[in-house]
Image (cartoon, rainbow, N blue to C red):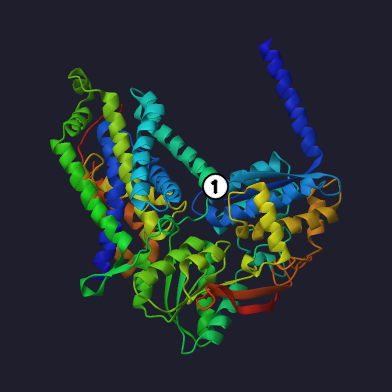
Amino acid sequence: MQLIANITVLAAIYALLACGYVLIYRVSRVMNMAHGELAMLGAYLLYTTASLFADHPVSAIAAALVLSLTVGVLVYVALMRKMTGQMVLAAILTTIAIGILLRGVIVLIWSASQQHPLQVLKFSNPSIELIGGARISTCAALMVLATVAVYAALFAFLRFGRWGMRLRAAGQNPLLAAQRGINLNAIYALAWALSTLTGSIAGMLIALDSGLDQTMVVIGLKAFAPALVGGLDSLLGALLGAVIVAAAEVLAIHYIDPLLSDVVPFLVLIATLIVRPWGLFGTREELDRV
Amino acid sequence: MLARVLAAALAAAALVCSANAQDAYVIGVTGALTGPAAGTNGPPIEGLRLYVDRLNASGGINGKKIQLTVLDDQGEPSKAAANAKRLLTQENVSLLVLSSLSSTFAPVIAETRRANVALMLMGAVCPKEVYPPADLLQFCTTAYAGGYDSRATLAFIKETAKEPVRIGFAAMAIPLSRGEIDYAEEQAKAMGMTPVDKEVIPPPTADYTPFATKLKDANPNWIFSWAPWVTQVKTFEALRRLGWEGDYITWAHIEAESELARLKDAKFYVIGANSLFQDNLPIHKQIVAEAKKANIRYPAEQMTEGWIGGLVLEAVLKAGGWPADAAKVRAAMENVKVDTQGLRGGPIEWSKENHFRTRQYYRVYRWDPAKSAVAVTKDWVAYDVK
């Protein structure tokens, strides 16, 4: 039972991070290599708002979420907008540069010391006993619930929401969407905002559960594998990819060798790419420009 | 016209830089200022800078300032190698300081060998090459050191345990952490303990619970972890969340003091060679005052490693005299004795044969619920370094 709990929590972490990759790729065909850094920045923003509103945790969390959305919009407006119409490779390289910049800025502002937003918010993180004697922390349970809520909201938004439909349209055929009066810049900014928000939620919950440090960048990168396994333009694929990669990783740790946990996500990725290069639920396509 | 003015300005700037470099001791530093290991390896560099700034403000050494050239390697071997190459060949440093993960050691050592410049490990784990008979170019001021740390830890466990010890181990998947835990496992067997599990955890891990689950299932009553702080403390917290109630002992990295106070767990021990600031010695007060004045980014209690590095650097450069070059600095490093003023249990002494210290002192701290404070559980114990 504990194994299932561990797989569920790890899958939730990967799924929440992976949907950010999917949102941006789906709309602009850009792989955001700064997603881990943006998730980490969201967590640091929570740490700051928690310090500012120590007695008002709800305000602190709400402010951090709003700031994360704003960061996403700013990244697009200030940097990625200039990449529209350029080669996809240039846009990807720009996201790598954003990541390097963010890492430096974060150390300059907050230092590289481990921080504990949970403590600043004066929350505790007791274990919850599940059926079969399995245990998970309260923050891990929140991570699972948040993942379910985020995916449900995203599916509903993309299926039924006016802006959601515009987002899908821009992703499928940007030229036609623009001709039909859809403001592509607004759509791309929305995708960046939502992607940064979901990544930040993951970052915040990881930081609340086990502290905030620079390792989050690499965790963000590891979530790239589930996104690719599922198919970079499919939310459902990201969810399934997260479950497959998490299950492979946890089972490898438990039954084979803990050292394999670093390798297994990429073994799964290679296996998937050999069979279906566009991922389990991805779309087969040939497009090389934003 | 503008181009000529710019060219003249650049030439003047180059001359000023060159004059400054020639008129100062040039020391190169490569370390993990960012990246996963930055929390452990960044503060020693800040501490060294704090000490050097203080020295420079009081006139420098032998009337000359110290110029620290610091480069970030993010804990990555390739970046550390590039940094070392640049510092040794372009900046012509007379000493290279390294504060990074052990995976960066091999390429940096290779570069220092090529340039025949001494390497001082400060805030990075001491490798066995600094023990007698020491490698010609490697020196170490860092508190933690392979072999001795495990011996001291296991001796403490044996002394403290009230029942037969079933011991679990946790390491990070980097060379020295794995090597030390393998050594500890063998030592534990030799000391009559029963090793029940050993988890080697990759550095960036999203969730430590799967590793902790395996450790807990092996049912140890003690766990020893010797790894960067992130791995040590996150494994412990995951174990507690799973309901494991045994004793956990781990290395007292620079983060230990604030973390003991955060965790408030009486069965979480840290063993280390540095005194903690709760001892409130005059040297601690001085570091706190200097840190406050300099408005540093890290807590003052994380400055110990860098401060000790600064003490040693000052002694070496003083002895080496002026003008400094790599050969004179290396020769001076082979005959150093530095009073650590209570930051360690004893002095740092280097000789031609021993580039570590002649005696290594250990102390154990934990959270004391009765006092509601961090307290010494076991006072200094000395080990002769042979």
**B234 or B144: nearer the eye?**
B234
The image quarter containing residue B85 is top right
Q: Quadrant of the C terminus of chain B?
A: bottom right
State how many labels appear.
Answer: 1
For the question of whether residue B121 can be seen, the reply is no
Name the residue located 42 percent from the left edge and 32 percent from the top edge.
A94
Q: Which residue is mark 1?
A: B78
**Seen in the image, is A194 located left or right of residue A60?**
left
Name the residue located 21 percent from the left edge and 52 percent from the top edge.
A148
**A198 or B181: nearer the eye?**
A198
Q: Amino acid at mark 1?
A: Ser
Percent across and percent down for residue B179 are: 53, 68
B312 is higher (above) or lower (below) than A70: below
A29 is higher (above) or lower (below) than B152: above
Percent across and percent down for residue B318 are: 84, 54
Name the residue located 79 percent from the left edge and 44 percent from the top edge.
B65
Q: Residue furthest left?
A: A160
**Seen in the image, is B334 located left or right of residue A112?**
right
Q: Residues within 10 Å of mark 1 (few under 14, many from 20)?
A: some
Q: Quadrant of the N terminus of chain B?
A: top right
Percent across and percent down for residue B239 are: 39, 71
The image quarter containing residue A92 is top left
Q: Residue furthest front?
A: A55
**A107 or B295: nearer the eye?**
B295
Q: Secondary structure at mark 1?
A: helix
Q: Chain of mark 1?
A: B
**Seen in the image, is B45 located left or right of residue B180?**
right
B333 is higher (above) or lower (below) than B375: above
Q: Residue furthest top?
A: B1
Percent across and percent down for residue A129 are: 26, 71
For the question of whether residue A25 can be seen, the reply is yes
